[in-house]
Amino acid sequence: MSVPYELTGRSQQKARTRDALVSATRRLLTQGVTPTVEDAAAAAEISRTTAYRYFPNQRTLLLAAHPEIQHESLLPDDAPTDPLARLDLVMQAHLRITLDWEPQLRTALRLSLEAAADAEPPLLRQGRAIGWIEHALAPLTATHPHLDLHRLAIAIRSAAGIETLIWLTDIAGLSRDQAAQTLRWSARAMLQAALAGNPPPQ
C-alpha cells in the first residue's frame, strides 16, 4: 500500500500545506464556488503541481473539506433530565452545526449521491447525529423501557439535517430560520407522539 504524500518526510510542513488547501476549499465553498484543485491552489497561494500531490482530483479535495465533528454529545454538562428539553437542546446545536457548515455539507451530500458502488461509505451516512439524539433520549430508558430509542432516534434524524434543510429552503421556499423552527417542531412532535403511545413502526 502506498503512503500518502503528506506522510512522507517533512510531515509538519506538509500538514500545514494540506491544511491550507482544505481551508481555502472551505472558504470557496462558503462563497458559493465548488472549487477545483487549481482553484484551491490559487486561493491558498500554492502551486498547482504541489496541490495535485495532496489531492489528485476534485473529489478527493472536496471530501477532505467535509467538516470533522467529533462531539460525542451535543448536550451541556448541566443538561436537564426532561427528554423534551434535552432533545430541543440537541436539535438547536445540530442545526447550528448544519447551518454553519451548510456549503460543505451540501457538497458532501452531492458526493455521497454520486458515490460509486465500490467507493468508501458516504460521509453523510456515519450515524453521528443518531447517537446525539439517542443520548438526549437516554432518560426514557427508565421511564419508558418499552420504547425502542434507537428507532425513535432514526425517525427524528430523518426529519433533521442537511437533506431536510435543503428541501425546506430550496423546494418549500422557507427561510433558514423558518426551516430551523420546522425541524425543531418535527423532532418534538415525534417524541411527543412516541410518549403518547404512537412510536415509530417496527
Image: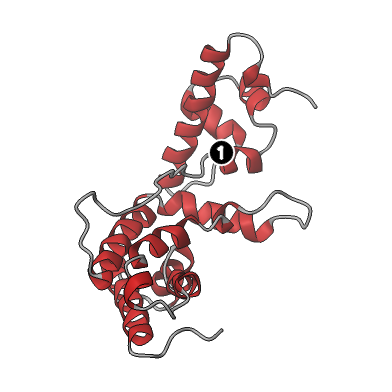
Q: Residue 145's x, y, as percent?
A: 41, 76
Q: Residue 166's x, y, as percent?
A: 45, 67
Q: Residue furthest bottom?
A: 197
- Quadrant for the C terminus, please: bottom right
Residue position for label 1? 64
- Quadrant for the N terminus, please: top right
Residue for point 40% across, 58% down:
132
Of residues 200 and 27, the one nearer the viewer is: 200
Q: Image check: 147 left or right of 14?
A: left
Q: Residue furthest top?
A: 10
Q: Is residue 45 above or below residue 166?
A: above
Q: Is residue 10 above or below residue 49?
A: above
Q: Image check: 73 left or right of 111?
A: left
> Which quadrant of the view contains residue 35?
top right
Residue for point 45% across, 58% down:
131
Tell me which amino acid carries mark 1.
Ala
Q: Residue 160's x, y, as percent?
A: 41, 68
Disc 1 residue crowd, few under 14, some 14–19, many 20+, Cα 10 Å:
many
Q: Residue 4's x, y, as percent?
A: 69, 24
Of residues 59 and 85, the one nearer the viewer is: 85
Residue for point 30% across, 56% down:
93
Residue for point 37% across, 81% down:
190
Q: Image check: 161 left or right of 189?
A: right
Of residues 182 and 90, the one nearer the viewer is: 90
